[in-house]
Amino acid sequence: MRVNKITIIMPAYNAAKTLRKTYGDIPDKLKKSIILVDDGSHDGTVKVAKSLGIETFVHPQNRGYGGNQKTCYTLALDKATDIVIMIHPDYQYDSSLSLELVRPILDDRADIMLGSRIRSRKEALLGGMPLYKYLSNRILTICQNIILGQNLSEYHTGYRAFKASVLKKLPFHRFSDDFVFDQEILVSAIYSGFRIGEIPVPVRYFPDASSINFKRSVYYGLGILVVLIKYLIVQLNIYRSPIFQR
């Protein structure tokens, strides 16, 4: 696959303290095309982004994590890009690994790539991942692998890369505006037969990195179970869902 352009998207919310470090670690050859969408931040995220020369768009009101991604992907596709990399600007993910993340896509060995934080339990916990999040991550990932017929080590990472052609075929505007968007786009991609790969990335949990609380985590987990149930009944031709298309 010959790639002409890679675009990085950053769905941002109150990332003023970490954006500069995240941007600084991005390989120089990838800094030519970066889009940041600010989802109604209350800090200086937009000011920092503009000072770095990042193309910046602002939601006048908070649209949610999924809603932010919808804007990000739409803007990236408008640029006629070939690959889209999502990097959270909260410095939780190692943006210096972006070229490694897209390499299997460049070699046409994968359509979607994930940066997995789960190489071992020890690494995940030493990196600051709360125990309840680690356990729920493991349980949900096992369930997802069984139901979806995959063998991924983690579905819940926010460090991702997509072929633009995949995003054009997935009905992502029909997905949730909340955190479960991350799972709907992966399950929809699996339903459509796209290939998903992964590389290991470091775990970074610290006070300035964004992280949903326990209550939101429970809602997120329940939302994933609902998506998996929809997938099963669609596969059985019992139900037709607008988020699953071939």
Image (tube, rainbow, N blue to C red):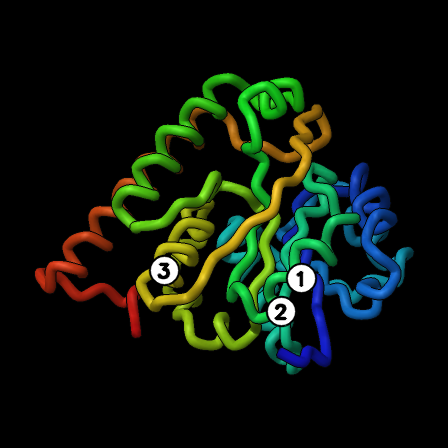
Residue located at (53% from left, 32% from top): 212
> Disc 1 on helix, strand or loop?
helix
Q: In this view, does 179 lie to the left or right of 55?
A: left
Question: Which of the two discs, 3 and 2, sits closer to the camera?
Answer: 2
Residue 107 percent location from the top left of the image: 62, 69
Q: Mark 1 points at which residue?
A: 103
For the residues labelled 3 and 2, the Cα–Cα distance comes to: 20 Å
Tag 3 near tag 2, CB within 8 Å? no
Q: Tell me the crowding category of disc 2: few under 14, some 14 to 19, or many 20 or more residues within 10 angstroms, Cα based.
A: few
Residue located at (46% from left, 45% from top): 179
> 59 and 27: which one is in front?
27
Q: Mark 2 points at which residue?
A: 107
Q: Is residue 22 left or right of residue 12?
A: right
Q: Mark 3 points at which residue?
A: 190
Give the residue type at disc 3.
Answer: Ile
Nearer-N-terminus badge (3/2): 2
> 210 and 147: which one is in front?
147
Give the residue type at disc 2.
Answer: Asp
Residue 223 percent location from the top left of the image: 32, 42
Q: Is residue 136 left or right of residue 204?
A: left
Tag 2 near tag 1, CB within 8 Å? yes
Q: In which quarter of the image is the C terminus?
A: bottom left
Question: In the rendered view, would you say 198 is above or below 54?
Answer: above
Nearer-N-terminus badge (1/3): 1
Give the residue type at disc 1.
Answer: Arg
Q: Write down the quadrant of residue 80 in the picture.
A: bottom right
